[in-house]
Image (cartoon, rainbow, N blue to C red):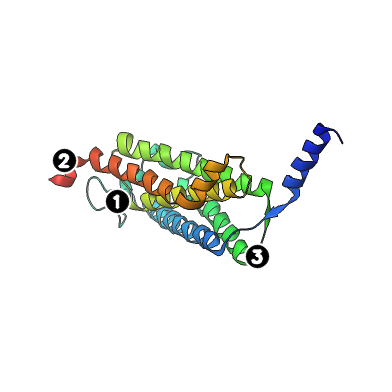
Amino acid sequence: MTKAAAASGTAAGEDSRTIGGSRAFAWLLVITGAAGLLAAWIITIDKFKLLEDPNFVPGCSLNPIVSCGNIMKSEQASVFGFPNPMLGLVTYSVVIAIGVGLLAGARYRRWYWLGLNAGTLFGVGFCTWLMQQSLYEINSLCLWCCLAWAATIVMFWYVTSHNVRNGVLPAPAGLRTFFSEFTWVLPVLHIGIIGMLILTRWWDFWTS
């Protein structure tokens, strides 16, 4: 057998094998998916109420900075031509379904895990853009949006960790070891940076 044939056979074997997940990882997907779904659901309901009554004030509009109403009225709240949280209603539900499937013993092929990783990467990228717009363009903060951001960040890093540790994403041994022992560091650091940006963006308001 030639090297090319052997490599092809190895790649085919990797693509055909199925990979499961631990109960802890499955529950993490269910919980983060549920948190994101809750945030998307409440924002969607408030958006509908705001469309019915322009004077409606969402319950999470607490002050000039923490003002969900300002976020909902912005152009950035409907990037794809419909309210952003409606996208969350679908995507977070999919994550919950995957987590429940793992709890039931499901195993998925490599392309499926890569698709989930790509989806969570898109989610983190989209949340990062929304965060930048919220802090520096709209100049308001939505608490439910913050919950969705945090859920998506945790989801992304743990899905990436799972894929690295199981060989779905090729990585050196040192990186696999790091993800096996210190995955929690990455979402904590990521969310901590966002917290610091929020704190410093409105420092005068928080300290007044």
Q: In the drawing, does residue 165 fall left or right of residue 127?
A: right
Residue at the spot of label 1:
55
Mark 2 vs 3, N-terminal side = 3
Q: Residue at x 58, y 55 (%)?
A: 94
Q: CA distance from mark 2 to mark 1?
A: 29 Å
Give the mark toward the camera: 2 or 1.
2
- Determine the residue located farthest toward the bottom in the rendered image: 104
Mark 3 vs 1, N-terminal side = 1
- Determine the residue located farthest toward the right in the rendered image: 1
Q: Secondary structure at mark 2?
A: helix
- Label 2: how many Cα within 10 Å (few below 14, some 14–19, many 20+): few
Q: Secondary structure at mark 3?
A: loop
Please tell me the numbered disc located at residue 204. 2
Q: Is residue 53 above or below residue 172?
A: below
Q: Position of residue 116 (x, y in %)?
A: 59, 48
The image quarter containing residue 97 is bottom right
Q: Position of residue 55 (x, y in %)?
A: 29, 51
Q: Amino acid at mark 3?
A: Gly
Please tell me the numbered disc located at residue 105. 3
- Label 3: how many Cα within 10 Å (few below 14, some 14–19, many 20+): few
Q: Residue at x 55, y 45 (%)?
A: 176
Please tell me the numbered disc located at residue 115. none
Quarter of the image that includes the C terminus? top left
Q: Residue at x 65, y 65 (%)?
A: 105
Q: In the drawing, does residue 80 fall left or right of residue 206?
A: right
Q: In the drawing, does residue 31 fall left or right of residue 69?
A: right
Q: CA distance from mark 3 to mark 1?
A: 49 Å
